[in-house]
Amino acid sequence: MRRLNPWLIVLFVLALFLMFSQAPMSGRASVNYNDFRSLLAQGKIERVVVQEGQANVTLKAPTTVPVVGAPQPREVTGFNVRLPSSQATPDSALIPQLEAQGVNYRFEQPSQWLGILLNFLPIILLIGMMYFFFMRAQGGQSGVMQFGQSRAKKYGKENRVQTKFTDVAGHEEAKRELIEVVDFLKNPGKYHQIGAEIPKGVLLVGPPGTGKTLLARAIAGEADVPFFSVSASEFMEMFVGVGASRVRTLFEDARKSAPAIMFIDEIDSIGRKRGAGIGGGHDEREQTLNQILSEMDGFDKTSSVIVLGATNRPDVLDPALLRPGRFDRQVTIDLPNLKEREAILKVHLRNKPMAPGVDVPEIAKSTPYFSGADLKNVTNEAALEAARLGKTQIDMSDFYRALDKITLGLENGSLTISPEEKKAIAYHEAGHAVTAAVIPGSDKLQKVSIIPRGRALGAAFYLPEEQVLMSKERLENQLVVSLGGRAAEEVFMGSVTSGAADDFRKATNIARKMVLEWGMGENFKNMALTTDSGPVFLGEDMAKPKAFSEHTSQLVDEDVKRILHRAYDRAKSLVTEYAAAMHEVADALLTQELITGDVVRDAVARLGGSTQPAPQTTA
């Protein structure tokens, strides 16, 4: 049952007091003073009580009198009358007349406390309103006295965490690392007996959406211990010291509930390097971080409280937070591989009606570099597509439409494209598709489309092979495929368009990495020309310094230019050699707007290459 706010009780009591204090003078008919004098002369009045310039009159018997504000006289047993100032005092001339008629009378002084209360009532109401709005701003029930209390959500006996490791698909290496934490929480004596110390803190590191929070909940569910969950931003307030106070109360609550797990999500929001801010530090954030460091040092060796942190930016964390004795271990949660994506998809499809032809491994192949959250979004979008079309089961076409929507955006059916522009788009996408089909070892072409989606007027979809290492030959092949669209425009349309802007950005980025980071340039083989000085916003450097001279920079540009020009020349040669296949693929795109990769591969295999130059047309 929710406890009543004490301020509301005080205000209610004040209202009742004021109402009853005014009761004797309220709820009665009002009569003019002349009519009152007339009734007094007639001897019809029994009692008169005078207070604050007003008389409360009681009649000996019900009498019909003219009432103020009433159209007709009314029969009353008493009334109120406003007295002139000269008659409202104990020494007034009214007293002899009352005594002559034998009227029982008295003069009453108003309560001093009532006057004081009435004077201070506006101030009291103002304070009450300020408190009410302040309490609402702080989250409802957390009032002024709880302003520095922890905001962490506690999951205990009443609302246990039900997530288990079986609910987390993939991440087998991370699970094996975290099973030791679960075993320590279940059997701490086994470790203490041999003198082993379990890590005080475990930092989960990985890209967004990979399941760091889910793994933390699974640890608490497996260990069956109280679980405190809080986002690091909950510690931050505009008042210095509030975050440190909340950290203290959180650690105190966790110690009282030991063995327990504390999970601090997005810990980089308060754990950034101290003293690195441009123009000075942030006092509140640094005090909060200092308190976390102090509390983690305060854990004794037998403490059964483990702190889990999660971040996708470990590079910005303060070194003191990562030293042994605090966050002793870092567990990397990477993007799922092919088998893990398949397992994750099966988890998200458990409660969805699937058509018999749904191929989960194929969907997993079509989603390279997708995180767990991305895969959940794919299954949800597919379900929405099926429901939108009135289906009772989700089939593969729904998944393909969902992937197209997620990767490229919604279909832009309202976009007006001229026939000449459409032809240029068709040859552009055919250039990508044919070069990908011709070059051995390229990513497998899945389909080609010239249906506008989002900001893309067309797209070629691939099923890339997931590789840990990228060879120089494979990178150069990627550049050829990326530049195949522009090469096809020049060869077959006789002009070029702005449609290759994104292709150039991707190709230039790959070429610069080949020269600067991977030592694949002709002038700079087997050396890296970049330094990792950390992000600029940390304040360690106002800008990343160059590690080489202007002359070296010119040589780097020459290497990048040479790599891109060589790839473009090769792409131009390929689309010219396979001109017949280019024409057939472009015509198929203009007719159908979407074709599969098998159509492109069949055209290349059937028509083959030609040494004859491709016919050019004027745009």
Image: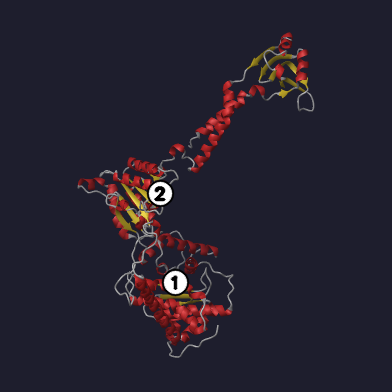
95 over 152 or under it: above or below: above
The C terminus sits in image quarter: bottom right
Q: Quadrant of residue 436?
A: bottom left
- Under circle 1, the secondary element is helix
Q: Nearer the viewer, residue 591 or 398?
A: 591
Circle 2 residue: 282
Give the amino acid at mark 2.
His
Circle 1 residue: 505
Q: Nearer the viewer, residue 560 or 324?
A: 560
Distance of mark 1 from mark 2, alpha carbons? 37 Å
455 over 421 or under it: above or below: above
Colouring style: secondary structure
Query: Is residue 173 left or right of 590 when viewed as pictured?
Result: left
Q: Nearer the viewer, residue 564 or 267?
A: 564
- Under circle 2, the secondary element is loop
Residue 549 place in picture, x, y as percent: 35, 70
Q: Is residue 83 visible?
A: no
- CB atoms of marks 1 and 2 within 8 Å: no
24 over 341 or under it: above or below: above
